[in-house]
Amino acid sequence: FLKEHMHKHIFLIGMPGAGKTTVGKVLAKELGRDFYDLDQTIQDKVGKSVQNIFIYDGKDAFSEYEYETIKELIYNKPSVIATGGGTVTSEKIVNLMRNNGLVVFVNRDVNHILDDLDLEIRPLVKESIEYIFNVYEERYPLYEQVAHIKIGNEGSITDAVQEIIEALP
Ligand code: S3P
């Protein structure tokens, strides 16, 4: 498996619950690359959970951590990086990702995401359903715009990984 893009990192973007981390781990293994989960890397580095960073430092500080952490990660050999769902809302993060790698939009139908969440947090409150719908609607065009490649994660993980590999330039 030798393709021209092999010198670049692969960034996975998409909604929370779209399967970026799960797909990313398998993709990395398949390509023989290291895998990084951005949220996890930030948590390890800062020593706080993502939730606590949001509570105590705020959304903008978290975004800055995302930016700084991606800047550090890109010094590694070409890897697969699963990013947080909000990275596309920062123009400087978008530029950093697009200039240093191939950006893949892992899409998953919002109803599909909600079904899975429903299994995890039951009963799911009406507000959070509405919130997820709203975020999805707001961000969908951004994910599409930012990504070089878009794939659908609606079936099995191996299907999604295969779809990415086939779509690689
Ligand atoms: C966020 C998604 C989260 C995490 C943070 C913000 C978002 O990552 O970065 O809670 O705004 O969509 P996941 O997409 O991995 O859940």
Image: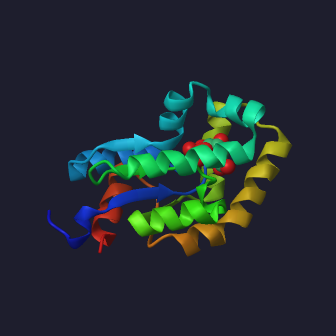
**Colour option used:** rainbow
Quick one: 45 or 169, which is closer to the camera?
45
Splitting the image into four quadrants, where does ligand 1 fall? top right
Q: Is residue 112 left or right of residue 166?
A: right
Residue 151 pos. (x, y %): 44, 66
Judged from this view, the residue extending furthest toward the right is: 127
Q: Quadrant of the C terminus?
A: bottom left
Can you see residue 94? yes
Q: Quadrant of the N terminus?
A: bottom left
Judged from this view, the residue extending furthest toward the top is: 47
Q: Is residue 77 left or right of residue 46?
A: left
Can you see residue 23? no
Quick one: 87 or 164, which is closer to the camera?
87
Q: In the displayed structure, would residue 166 be above or below residue 125? A: below
Residue 12 pos. (x, y %): 46, 56
- For image coordinates 35% across by 51% down, the residue present is 80
- For image coordinates 63% across by 69% down, the residue present is 142
Residue 139 pos. (x, y %): 68, 64
Quick one: 143 or 115, which is closer to the camera?
143
Q: Is residue 1 left or right of residue 135?
A: left
Quick one: 135 or 159, which is closer to the camera?
135
Q: Is residue 59 left or right of residue 46?
A: right
Q: In the displayed structure, would residue 39 be above or below residue 20? A: above
Residue 2 pos. (x, y %): 14, 66
